[in-house]
Image (tube, helix red, strand yellow):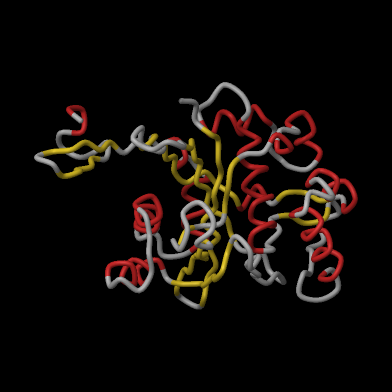
Amino acid sequence: MSLIPAATVLLLRQNNNDMEVLLVERSSNTAFGDLYVFPGGKVDPEDNFLDKLSSYSDLNDADCSKLLDIKTGGASFWIACIRECFEEVGVLLARKKDGSMIDLNNKDKDRFIDYRERLISDQISFLEICKKEELFFETNNIVPFSHWITPDIETKRFDTRFFAAKMPKDQPTLHDGNELTNSLWIKPREAIKKAWDGEIKMILPTSKNLEQTFDFGSTDELISFYKSGGSSEIKSILPKFKKVDGRWEGRLPDDEGYDDF
């Protein structure tokens, strides 16, 4: 069974001394229904404008592929991450090519709301929006964070690249109300506690990525670490499951007995 490439993003912001992450609740009618996850989705064919990426970013496909430790096509994960973030929560990880910031709270709000609605309904492509608005992606504030592969017991399997990104200024977060029914900014440790207490539903990749942020005191510290070489430490995580005495048990790569599963 072939793996479906996907990208998702831990959108981070600094609230005084606390780092917060954006979690979104999936609609019960979608994949991962009723779960709290990060914005993201599969890589679409339209995300493969690799030869044009250098017009919209400091990175090119060779750079992106090297950072993800793949031969080619790495840029499509970055583009999917940026596009999905805009589609799902209305946050655009980009600025103008002239260096000016986009103000989605005020002067640019109505225009980009229209773009988003048309993008979601397939009336316009993300590349067309980039061209019209002369956008330049904030790739300096987007870093590879982890890599998870859906276990082989599932019928639909994803090859998911998780990114961490710094929340831009002058932008709101507006979940789409269709695939997403709720969103909240929350401290990672508080999110884990809510999951343990049964207040929110969460799957293993979400909780493990939240725990991965615990070692960092701020958003800037986390982004800086992964930008300055931390991405090279990312290992692919393929959970394994099997029945032991009639009960399902799981292992992660660093768990004892993983190779025997």
The residue shown at (69%, 57%) is 86
Based on the displayed image, in which of its 4 quarters is residue 117 positioned?
bottom right
Q: Position of residue 170 (x, y in %)?
A: 72, 72
The residue shown at (50%, 62%) is 28
The residue shown at (77%, 54%) is 121
Q: Position of residue 179 (x, y in %)?
A: 60, 60
The residue shown at (48%, 69%) is 20
- Residue 91 in view: yes
Q: Residue furthest right?
A: 132
- Residue 233 in view: no
Q: Nearer the viewer, residue 158 or 32?
A: 32
Q: Is residue 215 above or below residue 183?
A: above
Q: Residue furthest left?
A: 245
260 relative position to 149: left or right: left
Numbered disc total: 0
Based on the displayed image, in which of its 4 quarters is residue 103 positioned?
bottom right
Q: Is residue 226 above or below residue 28?
A: above
Q: Position of residue 152 (x, y in %)?
A: 36, 32
Q: Residue furthest top?
A: 71
10 relative position to 114: left or right: left
113 relative position to 38: left or right: right
Q: Position of residue 38 (x, y in %)?
A: 51, 57
Q: Quadrant of the C terminus?
A: top left
Q: Nearer the viewer, residue 13 or 21?
A: 21
164 relative position to 73: left or right: left
